Amino acid sequence: MRALLGMGHAHIGLWALILAGCTGRVEYAKGEAGAEGAEEGGAVAEGGAEGSADGGGSTDGAGSGADGDPSDGGGDGGAVETPALRRPPEAPDLDPAPGVVEVELVAAHQTRTVADGRGGEIVVEGYAYNGSSPGPTIRAQVGDTVRVRLRNELEVPTTIHWHGLDVPFEMDGVVHGPGGGAPMAGAVEPGATFTYSFTVDRPLTAWYHPHFDSARQVDAGLYGALVVVDPSEPAVEQDLVLVLDDLPLDGIVVDEGGVDTGGHGTGGGHSGPSEGLWLVNGDVAPRLEVPAGLRLRLRLINVSNSGMLWIGADDEAPLRVIARDQGLLSAIEAPTRELLAPGDRVELEVEPSASPLRLIDHPYVIEGGEATGAAAPVLEILARGAGVPADPLRWPTSGAAPTTDPGSTDVRWLLQGSLSGDDWRINGEVFPEVTVAEAVVDQPVVIEVQNLSPTTHPFHLHGMAFEVLSIDGAAPAARQVEDTLNLGLYQRARLRAVPPAVGDWMAHCHILPHADGGMMTVLRVEEAE
């Protein structure tokens, strides 16, 4: 079933009016309000609990009304309310033993309703973990053993990949090796269960998603956050996970073959085919109200299968960036805009003041970067009361300098492709028919990745983090460790990794239609002879 778009009144406040200017291409199917999905959808408001068995949906007041003329956007039915920021449900720990976190995830179909910010609704027939998209947030401490029992109630196989974590190869969630050979680790078949088990060794914001038919299953809603904390880090009053996804304007279809997203992720401009409405924890442009004087730690995750999020404050005030993919930075940064490619994470420290903080998404296209068009609202943060804004925290940054580039190269990968079709390659090869690169466990490997295609590519390496030695010959100002690195048109990056475990580790573009189209290869890590 394609997503159903229902009309409501359209007397729009300022924040919603900005949104309306960015989403004018939505075509409403009048009278198809999708009541069944709205009944099933619940809300998790700020600090609240799950509102229904499936946890999806939008907050009260953010849906459609009955009055107003949909043709001209006027009417006297009252303003469309901005939804309060919902928080993904927390995954309950089923094992009371210290040092162990045990969680159950159920992958199944879900109908959810999203208010579009204009008085209408989008009913999405998709997938979810435990009836929620985003799925439950899994929290652990450094050194914990994490066990996740996956039960597959879909009609198709699935897996879970632990994006950003170093896990044993058999726990990585990847199913097919190079050359079209036997499965690397079996997919979880419909009706079956599988338990993933691994130890988390450093504090960071990671996330989980399928690595089987990834572009379709992730786009359908199978994703969630996994947060690893270090109790010695400075404490904030509110530590918030913000899962960001773009909902395709032309809908989502679920059938026995999987999910068809109606061309989502195939290219195009800002709010074009590659980017629809940005959702934060399932809602369009929500707001967060907190007492003045609090400190917030915002953990942003771009789970879109192809959308680029170029985020900043609407007044161009600098952001306080404390961490990215692999945890705290070597030095705090203060950019006015932060680019989040698919798979990327960033952590911001925020001290709300009397002036609202409005985060917006600037136009950005994978065919070349900055684009024309209006910015779209993402999140508004308001401070209540007359408290004095808190002082920024002192984070335990290392101040480490970049590792010196040895000058030699062990692995070289060229990213190639064409906008005219689904032909995406690495070194001229289409996965799974690829030449396997090799490395030795616990020994450094220098990898050079160059983008020779007409689009950007967020490069992701499984099984290990990597240090960025240079981009186009320029070393970073401080040591930079990532697991996903966006490569602009014709950029060249030199990376250094130390593989911690043996395995056939995937390397691919995290624009998932590109990966599914063949832009994927393998780094085989073996024991030293």
Image (tube, helix red, strand yellow):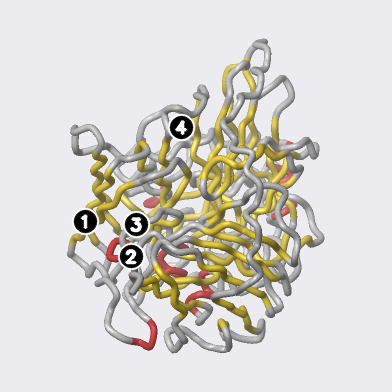
Front label number (2 vs 4): 2
Separation of marks 3 and 4 at Cα, in angstroms = 33 Å
Q: Residue at x 55, y 41 (%)?
A: 65
Residue count near mark 1 (Cα–Cα under 10 Å), binned few <14, some 14–19, many ≥20: some
Front label number (3 vs 2): 3
> Mark 2 is on which residue type?
Gly
Provide the secondary structure element on which disc 4 rests.
loop
Q: Which residue is mark 3?
A: 167
Q: Which residue is mark 1?
A: 195
Provide the secondary structure element on which disc 2 rests.
loop
Front label number (3 vs 4): 3
- Specify the label residue 45 is tagged with: 4
> Mark 4 is on which residue type?
Ala
Residue count near mark 3 (Cα–Cα under 10 Å), binned few <14, some 14–19, many ≥20: many
> Mark 3 is on which residue type?
Val
Image quadrant holding the N terminus, namely: bottom left
Judge by depth and name the residue closer to the eye, 521 or 478: 478
Q: In this rendering, is residue 288 above or below 42? A: above
Q: Residue at x 72, y 54 (%)?
A: 22
